[in-house]
Image (spheres, grey):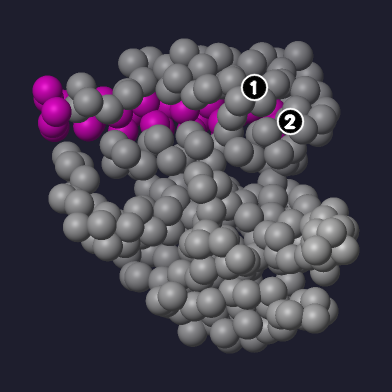
Amino acid sequence: MSGIHSAPTRSIRPFRSSEEYLFAMKEDLAEWLRDLYRLDITLDTFLDALETGAVLCQLANSITGAAETFRREFGSRAARVQLPGSGVTYVGAAQPGTFVARDNVSNFISWCRTQMRIKDVLMFETEDLVLRKNEKHFVLCLLELARRAARFGMAAPVLIQLEREIEEEIREELHLPPEETPLPKPQRRLSDFKNLDEVQFLVSRCTCPTLFPMVKVSEGKYRVGDSSTLIFVRILRNHVMVRVGGGWDTLEHYLDKHDPCRCPALGESRRTQTVGL
């Protein structure tokens, strides 16, 4: 992947569902896998392309290969990073819905747990993918896998690149020493902030008597609400994404949870406090 891609002006569209942030993640992961393996995979075909487990196992073996290269090149320094020691055996010709396909997915899950040490809270089960029982768990697991693999040289999805960019910004502001990284950091373009004017448009939809505060601190960084909470806002293609805590959300959904006129529970709480005064 050549770098972080900015969306064309006016391409931003707000989200109206608490689940639609998954669309942004799936789109990013689909492009990542398409670049790695030249797959015919899109947002719409994301689950269909992966349900046999063959591509997932191929990914596991690619990550294991990158880990081996990392271990050879950096020796004792590589011991500081959690590295997989073995790959996955799988059937590449498995058909959707077959027991062979389920075995492939199960083998991949086992590899994620034992070789990559991904925590259960970020794992998925075979039925989550094969029967579409929990798409969110599957997507979050792949994103965490990509995050860990990037530490030892695998190409990263754009979201993971954005995370690294934000982490570096925080370290610079706190005057912390650079993170010790054995591998040279990949060349990439910095985020393009020109579309972040859309943030003010989304905030302006607030109907509270006093506009919900969202103050720009610097490019891509905002202080929100009545607290001192800082959030980082980035553009991912045609999505306005928010990095808060350790995860991602869409700005629209974030505002739905924190702006009193959009969140009935917050609005009622504020009215109750006003009456109490």
| 88 sits to left or right of 154 | right
Give the main secondary structure of the magenta stretch. Answer: helix
Name the element at disc 2. helix
Residue 61 magenta-highlighted: yes
Front residue (pair 91, 263): 263
Q: Residue 214, percent across and down?
A: 59, 74
x%, y% of residue 223?
Answer: 52, 68
Give the mark, 1 or 2, whose residue is nearer the N terminus: 1
In the picture of the structure, the residue carrying the numbered disc 2 is 129
Range drawn in magenta: 50-77
Q: Residue 144's x, y, as percent?
A: 50, 37
For the residue marked with disc 1, what is the amino acid?
Val
Q: Taking 222 as reference, is 257 above or below it?
A: above
Quarter of the figure with the N terminus:
bottom left
Q: Is residue 138 visible?
A: yes
Mark 1, Cα crowd under 10 Å, few <14 / some 14-19 / many 20+, is: many
- How far apart are the two marked residues, 1 and 2, measured between alpha carbons? 8 Å
Position of 124 compared to 79: left or right? Answer: right
Rendered position, 205 above or below 137: below
Looking at the rendering, in which quadrant would you find the C terminus?
Answer: bottom right
Classify 10 Å Cα crowding around label 2: few (below 14), some (14-19), many (20 and above). many
Q: Is residue 154 left or right of residue 58?
A: left
Task: Please tell me in which quadrant of the rendered image residue 102 appears.
Answer: top right
Q: Which mark is residue 256?
A: none
The reply to whether discs 1 and 2 touch (Cβ–Cβ < 8 Å) is yes
